[in-house]
Amino acid sequence: MIIRAHRRGRVSSLRAATAAAAAATVVGGLLSGCSVSDEQLRPGVAAQVGDDEITLDEIDEAIDVACGFFADEERAGFPRSLARQQFVSALVQRSAAAQALEEEGLAVGAAYEQAAGAIETQNAQIPADQRAPFILLNEAAVFVDAAARALGEAAFDEEGEVPADPAITTQRGGTELASWIEANDVEINPVFRLTVADGQVVADTGGASVAVSDFARATLLDPLTASAEQVADTADLLPASQLCGAAPEA
């Protein structure tokens, strides 16, 4: 899930602002979460992933820092809700990957350690006091990719032969991760308007949190398919309090 904003020649993105692992995008689309009613999650919980709990405070603290960076940089504003969706999706995927590895008695390989070790350097252009949320997203992407590769290699090994192409093993691991999520309790707070369709995490346009006013409908975006132009147009409609980054110029 990539958040983009474009206005007057400027482009801003939580992923673009950092050096996220591109291979994790392949895996990310294979992971899923189940949207539930507010009564099924304890207050303050953003998502429940098996035995793990992701709190709303954890999400909003990261968003406050990340959006503060974009505002300080005078990056074109984009809906804060899209940033929240990205963080929730990333942390749900990482949690699922970690638990799937643990259940199989597996660990991420040396490639993960090397990639994770480079994340701090890759984000060196961001002030130290604003770096944590970007490192969080980068590490989650790297970890999910490494976990998928480990799970894929293990699955192929059980069948007798591991393909030499890491992309094949990573794709197979993504399928294994998706199967883990289907077999375990994964609940996402409907406030984030995320649900699952055909094994994909998509915008929830029919759940309990769907906005009903004309203004709300006009500003409801699909975080996975929204174009840069749609994001920028929506940002023009929102008050500064609902933007991540600088408010559009009058």
Image: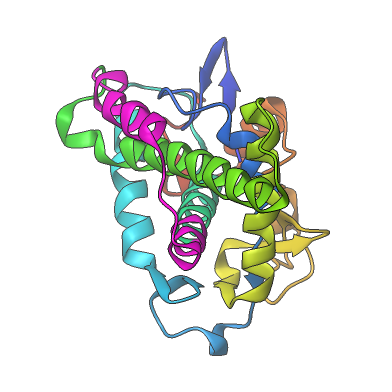
Q: Residue furthest bottom?
A: 39
Image-based side of 99 in relation to 149, left or right: left
Height in image: 245 above or below 95?
A: above
Quadrant in the picture for residue 163: top right
Q: Is residue 71 visible?
A: no
Q: Nearer the viewer, residue 125 or 242?
A: 125
Tell me the residue at 43%/43% (across/down).
143
Image-based side of 228 in relation to 242, left or right: right
Q: Main secondary structure of the magenta part?
A: helix
Image-based side of 135 in relation to 22, left or right: left
Looking at the figure, which quarter contains the N terminus? top right
Image-based side of 190 in relation to 175, left or right: left
Height in image: 190 above or below 8?
A: below
Q: Residue furthest left?
A: 129
Height in image: 8 above or below 12?
A: above
Q: Nearer the viewer, residue 147 or 24?
A: 147
The residues colored magenta run: 96-124
Quadrant in the picture for residue 109: top left
Rendered location of residue 245, percent (x, y): 41, 33
